[in-house]
Image: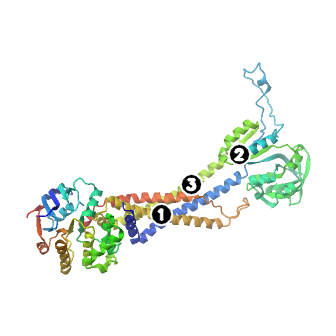
Amino acid sequence: MGEIILEARKINKYFHDPVDIKVLTDIDFSINKGEFVSITGKSGCGKSTLLYILSTMDTDFDGDLLIDNISMKNKKEPQLAAVRNEKIGFVFQFHYLLNEFTVLKNVMLPALKLNQFPLKEIEQKAMERLKMLGIEHLAQKSANQVSGGEKQRVAIARALINDPDIIMGDEPTGNLDKKNTEVVFDIFKRLAEEFNQTLLIVTHDQSFAERTHRIINMEDGKIII
Amino acid sequence: MNFKLIFDIAKALLLARWKQSLVAAIGVTFSIGMFITLLSFMNGLNDMLDGLILNRTPHIRLYNEIKPNVNQPINLSKSYQHYHNFIRSIKASGSRQAIYDNGAIMQALLNDKRVLGFSPKITAQVFFNDGNIDITGAVNGIDVQKESKLFHFSEYITAGTATDLERVPNSIVLGKGLAEKLLADLGDVVQVTTAKGEIFQLKVVGYFQSGIQELDKTQSYASIMTTQKLLGQSANYITDIQIKLTDIDKAPAISREYTQLFGSDAEDIQTANAQFETGSFVRTLISYAVGVTLLIVAGFGIYNILNMMIFEKMDTIAILKAIGFSGKDVKSIFLVIALSIGFFGGLLGLMLGLGLSLIIDQVPFTTASLPTIKTYPISYNITFYLIGSVFSLVTTFLAGWFPARKASQVDPVIIIRGK
């Protein structure tokens, strides 16, 4: 197996409001570089909660999380933001583009925030990503003028811009029709197989999950397979 | 931090809701504009009212007060030096009101760097005879040129010319009110009786209007020479030396120094006209209070609009955080939004203030008591504009601070999951 890119060590999570409920119990697994992993389970089993912990956005948990062999446990908010910026690409269920900007600018934003390359280079990289996903003709359109399927592809392009260690998706096809689901799935598969991109996708779509390399099945806050 | 990016995002957010942004900016523009206009107008008025008195009041006046002599003979006697000496019925020794050795004093003033200029003066109490009625009044003997230069004398002449006082022998400029009482036209001759009972005929060459009616009913002006003649005194007789300083605030100190140095009484402007400072201060205070209130109201407007904007832009904030913007970045973005509203609104406000001031400056304003004022007075003081611009930034910063902090604390998980 390849090197480990993400590791969860005995993660426990409670919700305190309105009463104390344990939502995650002893989550313990790791993901290797280049793996295409899906997390499935019924609604309310805690899979999204887990994803937000893994993405560093939720810091209220017990246990440890390692990304690229670095512990996230004691990092402060700005450092975690930097980790998200550099190492994690995000694709949400509801597209979440910034409507104030063009498609191209949306894709460029994480790279602009990272601020490691000159503007010209970032622009070129963003265009490459759009081309790769077959939506380069949308580059100058405003983000709210493109269709749902296209938006999701723009979001994927945005997730890819900083060459992240891992791409995380929270039901990325949950809001798309069959045809667009296929398109998005094919993109993920291509990223995994052609570009050796690590992917971690939360989904309740069994047919989607079955076609990934590895399925992590969850029930009542525990991993069952 | 990447400021260019922060500015970029702030600009995009501002322009996305440009109508709201505009309303907020107009609020600032209006309040800064009003602040500037109010202060300019108020201070213009203050300066005018102060000028009414202060322009024509010397900063220090040297004169001899009519009062009992403090050095009574008994105090000089060696044998009674250590006694308490009670003396009754002392009479004031006002026999000589003239300033002793005034030539030397004037020479010393000429060499004093703190003195802007000075002008000698003689006051003489007289009766103006109109038929069988005597009107009490005073003739001020002045050096017309110095008086005009230092105390704007010629500006208050409403008819005739000031310089005629020196050209026409035995001439007089009457206060407007006094001239009306005497029914004296230009070129007429009025008769005055001095305190010593001598009668003189003086030719009216001008009217004088100070804006203070009480003064205009009793005062008149003549040249120093004419006045010396009235009093039957020699050419070095002078009762007052009026001094204008380069720095008015030093008047009390210098006045004390001159009392010592020249052995005459000296009165400074602060002591003589304390009430004017108080009046100006209160008026300025009121205008600042109103201006600041306007700005605070505008601040609340900005606070409201930013709060609303943050509520609407929850998704955007969550996304920014998810793709790697820290809470600090988000806070900066919203602070930049607030400050840009303050900056551009403030800038327009300064222009609005200047524009309104210029308009008010053109509005005719004539009043009988103020012959030199033709339009409403405006003070163009750079300080108001500085205060206005600093205040617009400070208010908008404070108004933006709390919404920005709220935005920085938005939890992206709740927003993203909550859909």
Q: Pick the quarter of the image with the N terminus of chain B.
A: bottom left
Question: Mark 3: few, some, or many residues within 10 Å (few <14, many ≥20)?
Answer: some
Q: Residue B309: which disc?
A: none
Amino acid marked by disc 2: Lys
- Circle 2: element type: loop
Q: Residue B286: which disc?
A: 3
- Circle 3: element type: helix
Mark with earlier residue (3, 2): 2
Amino acid marked by disc 1: Phe
Residue A42 rendering spot, x and y as whole percentages:
13, 68
Residue B408 is drawn in which quadrant? Answer: bottom left
**Mark 3 → mark 2, Cα distance in angstroms:** 37 Å
Residue B74 is drawn in which quadrant? Answer: top right
Question: Would you name the residue on which mark 1 appears?
Answer: B343
Amino acid marked by disc 3: Ile
Question: Would you name the residue on which mark 2 appears?
Answer: B113
Residue B229 rendering spot, x and y as whole percentages:
89, 47
What is the chain identity of the residue bearing mark 2? B
